[in-house]
Image (spheres, rainbow, N blue to C red):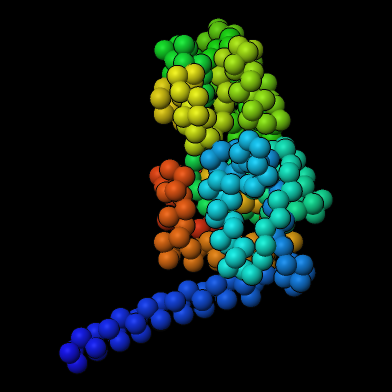
Amino acid sequence: MQKLQAFVVGVAMAAAVGVSAVAVRAQDAALLVPADVRSRGTLKVGSQQTFPPVEFREPGKQEVTGASADLLAEIARRLGLKLEYVQAEYAALIPGIEANRFDVASGGISDTEEREEKLDFVNYMRSGGSILVRADDQTKYRTIEDFCGKSVATLLGSRVIMSAVEKASEACIAKGAPAIRAEQLPSAPDARMQLDLKRVDGYLGDFPALVYMQAQFPGRYNIAGESYILTPYITSWGFAKSRTGLRDAVRKAAQDMLADGTYTKILSKWGLEGGALPEITINRPASKRSS
């Protein structure tokens, strides 16, 4: 009986130490929050809110949901803040940070060396650009090389994807084929509508978002090549370069979540565990990674 009591007490003490350690880590992260943000009590997040399963609003609802939304909600809680979303089209995310409309640029933005000239990024998920096609056309398109003389749609501000399309289009011309026509649109629903109307032959977007879209409309769409990745990138949250304290607070809280399992649990909830990073980093785009 004494041994059993000692074991129970030991387990209780270990649990208390574990809870205490989590509390200390959260407190450490909260101490990095700039005074003006802490005084305001809110973390303002700029997001297009049309990017499932990363960050979106379900039809008829106002609440923003998704993997990024869940991660940010937990980060805000650990920092002692509340989330406040500001709707912004994808192309307006970086200008919105520069104009101080919000504290964090979110909603599927990716870290690139070019964008790092303007913002700092906290990297939280591995992803990649893929191509959504109509189900009837799935045998026609396997890679971007199959789109010579065809048209594609992508989002305004998707510089990484557009660079890959421009490079592929140049390759088409070099081999005597017509160029790829690209149309940039404000939101994912706009791009999908153009695909439905057969005004474009493919929609280029984030692989997780396209898989989610395919699942929402069974039999209507397919991913080109089933899982073809046009270009890899790292989905991130963007911060003004003058806001290193806030950037570091968010990174610290997210890294603590990775350490205690919360990060992986949230990604798994949305089927995105395959995109989990081994470490929450700052300014490490796909171009600076070996894999």
Q: Is residue 74 visible?
A: yes
Residue 203 on image: x %, y %: 57, 23
Residue at image location 53% in from the left, 48% down from the top: 67
Question: On the image, which quarter does residue 181 sit in?
Answer: top right
Please indicate whether residue 290 sits to the left or right of residue 183 in the image: left
Q: Is residue 287 above or below residue 164?
A: below
Q: Is residue 67 above or below residue 194?
A: below
Residue at image location 53% in from the left, 57% down from the top: 281
Residue at image location 74% in from the left, 42% down from the top: 88
Q: Nearer the viewer, residue 230 or 20?
A: 20
Q: Is residue 117 visible?
A: no
Please indicate whether residue 126 sits to the left or right of residue 204 in the image: left
Q: Nearer the viewer, residue 56 or 119?
A: 56
Residue 134 on image: x %, y %: 51, 16
Please indicate whether residue 265 sits to the left or right of residue 96 in the image: left
Q: Quadrant of the N terminus?
A: bottom left
